[in-house]
Amino acid sequence: LDFGATRSYSKEFVDGYLRVVWANANRDRDTLLDITTQMGFLTGEENEEMITAHVQSGFTLGEPFLKDEEFDFQKSQISSRLSAHSAAFMKHRLTPPPEEVYTLHRKLAGAFMLCIKIGARVNCRQLLLG
């Protein structure tokens, strides 16, 4: 059983995280950095390498939501591109992300991997708008 799947999240966290998703989907660097600093993903003291990795991984996660059209998960190579930022996170992260993120990102990674495995093409922007 995956008890992480039963986890609930506060309204404050969900609202903030949705703002992060929108910032990523719209490639809005300033809003992304502002919100993620407010939420505790960043301290505000990170070096440029960490900031760049944070923004690029966010924008990569936002790709499925970028356009109002089907996103081809299988052709995107999204998981390998995300892992490219791991070394910067391991070396330069000054604070762990909010606790809620661990279970949420595990859920999102599972959904992305399932979409890749089955060759899903999904208009994720419409899901986000809905």
Image (cartoon, rainbow, N blue to C red):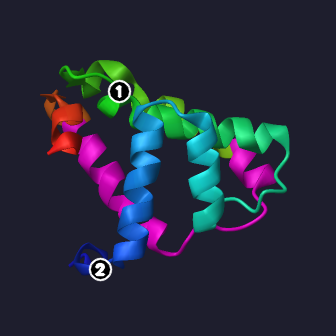
Q: Which residues are magenta?
A: 87-115
Q: Is residue 8 above or below residue 42?
A: below
Few, some or many residues within 10 Å of mark 1 (<14, 14–19, 20+) = many
Badge count? 2
Residue 88 showing in the rendered view:
yes
Few, some or many residues within 10 Å of mark 2 (<14, 14–19, 20+) = few
Q: Is residue 102 above or below residue 114?
A: below
Is residue 18 found left or right of 37 in the rendered image? left
Residue 98 on the magenta span: yes
Is residue 107 found left or right of 22 in the rendered image? left
Residue 45 on the magenta span: no
Identify the amino acid type marked 2. Arg
Residue 79 showing in the rendered view:
no
The residue at the point 30 percent across, 18 percent down is 75
- The residue carrying mark 1 is 66
Can you give x and y, in whole percent of width and height, for residue 3 in the image? Answer: 27, 81
- The residue carrying mark 2 is 7
- 3D distance between C-alphas at marks 1 and 2: 28 Å
Quarter of the image with the N terminus is bottom left
Can you give x and y, in whole percent of width and height, for residue 85 in the image? Answer: 64, 38
Quarter of the image where one finds residue 15 = bottom left
Q: Looking at the image, is mark 1 or mark 2 earlier in the sequence?
A: 2
The residue at the point 29 percent across, 79 percent down is 7
SS at mark 2?
loop
SS at mark 1?
helix
Magenta stretch, overall SS: helix
Quarter of the image with the C terminus is top left
